[in-house]
Image (spheres, grey):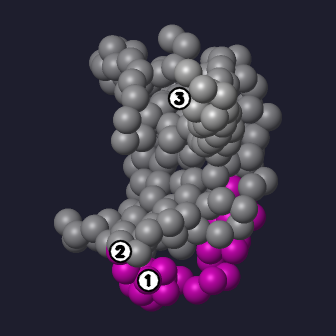
Amino acid sequence: MNKGCLYSLISIAIAFIIFFYYMSSLLNFPFREPYSIREITDNFESNKIEIENTIKYYNSILPANTSVNIEFNNGSVEIFHLYRNGEVSNFWKSSKIGIPLDSLLNELNWTSNELTTLNKKLLKSNAISISGGPKRIEIGWIRRGIGIYFYQLHADNLSSKEIEEINGVCSSIFYADNIVFTYGSGAIGSMCFPGI
């Protein structure tokens, strides 16, 4: 093998390593460990009051027979899904697919004020997203790669049967009364709670 070919192979290998490192840092994957149950519990307990305040606000601005899934990143809406009357309307900041954000806000009779307030309340809760309706709300705590850790809060305490069903699914962990910790892996990967 001549020196030119060897230098080309080394350059390609270095470029690949730099690219892989850069992409993995963007996705928080695969070099970071999953969060432990202790970290998830500690974060929930230290932000419990703010999480409850965020849910109260969310329920107060959510029209009847409607639910949304909204995720923020650095103060801007990344994902917004509106569910109403069996229909879904979507907005993804990262793609051209879906309808404009203003159209979703109009359907909800929301303005940028509601979005700003919701984002501030989520930030105070150390969270990035909220979804659901009055009977069950999911607060998205943090992303790990394309997966996300959630706090699922039910309006009523869960029955023993419901707790058994929750604990029988590898993506959920019953915490207490009406609170379940869940993990959504996103489009790819194991649906199971990491580290369990």
The disc at residue 118 is none
* Upstream in sequence: badge 1 or badge 3: 1
Give the amino acid type for the residue marked by disc 3 in the picture: Phe
| Main secondary structure found in the magenta portion | helix
Q: Is residue 95 above or below residue 168?
A: below
Q: Nearer the viewer, residue 145 or 61?
A: 145
Quadrant in which residue 10 is drawn = top right
* Neighbours of disc 2 within 10 Å: few (<14), some (14-19), many (20+): few
- Mark 3 is surrounded, within 10 Å at the Cα level, by few (under 14), some (14 to 19) or many (20 or more) other residues, namely many
Q: Which residue is mark 1?
A: 100
Seen from the viewer's position, the closer of residues 57 and 26 is 26
Which amino acid does the dot numbered 1 rest on? Pro
Indicate the position of residue 176 as horizontal and vertical percent values: 56, 23
Residue 144 percent coordinates (x, y)? 60, 35
Q: Is residue 104 above or below residue 44?
A: below
In magenta, the rendered stretch is: 98-122
> In screen coordinates, is 59 left or right of 113?
left
In this view, the residue in front, 172 or 17, is: 17
- The mark tally for this picture is 3
User: Which quarter of the figure is the N terminus placed in?
Assistant: top right
Between the residue at mark 2 and the residue at mark 3, the CA separation in whole angstroms equals 30 Å
Q: Which residue is mark 3?
A: 181
